[in-house]
Image (cartoon, rainbow, N blue to C red):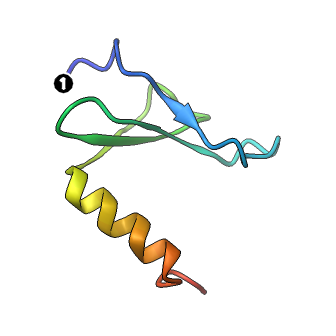
Amino acid sequence: MDLSRAVWRKSTRSGSSGNCVEVAAPPQVVMVRDSKQRQGPVLSFSPSEWVAFIEGIKAGGFEA
């Protein structure tokens, strides 16, 4: 997949610690990468997988 035209976003709640992820969502896929390693690996999810993940976060499903 050509990522050269992907528009990456970082949360406005990200602090200055540098421990952030960036998300891009071209059609039919949601991609996530480490903001410190922009040339590193990218995780890809279907839109329905991403929605399920976000809903799980909102429901507290990933609390430690």
Please state the horizontal and vertical placement of residue 1, each as a whole percent of the image. Answer: 18, 24
Please state the horizontal and vertical placement of residue 32, each as a whole percent of the image. Answer: 41, 43
Q: In which quadrant of the rendered view does residue 40 lie?
A: top left
Q: Nearer the viewer, residue 10 or 34?
A: 10
30 w.r.t. 50: above or below:
above
Q: Residue furthest right?
A: 16
Please state the horizontal and vertical placement of residue 12, each as a whole percent of the image. Answer: 69, 41
Per the image, the residue denoted by label 1 is 1
Q: Nearer the viewer, residue 12 or 40?
A: 12
Q: Amino acid at mark 1?
A: Met
30 w.r.t. 48: above or below:
above
Q: Residue at x 72, y 46 (%)?
A: 14
Q: In which quadrant of the rendered view does residue 63 lie?
A: bottom right
63 w.r.t. 50: above or below:
below
The tally of labels here is 1
Q: Residue furthest top?
A: 4
Q: Alpha-carbon neighbours of circle 1 within 10 Å: few (<14), some, or many (≥20)? A: few
Q: Is 40 placed left or right of 45 in the picture?
A: right
Please state the horizontal and vertical placement of residue 47, each as a whole percent of the image. Answer: 23, 51
Locate the C terminus by quadrant.
Answer: bottom right
**Element type at mark 1:** loop
Q: Residue at x 33, y 35 (%)?
A: 25
Q: Residue at x 34, y 12 (%)?
A: 4
Q: Residue at x 21, y 31 (%)?
A: 27
Q: Is 49 placed left or right of 4 in the picture?
A: left
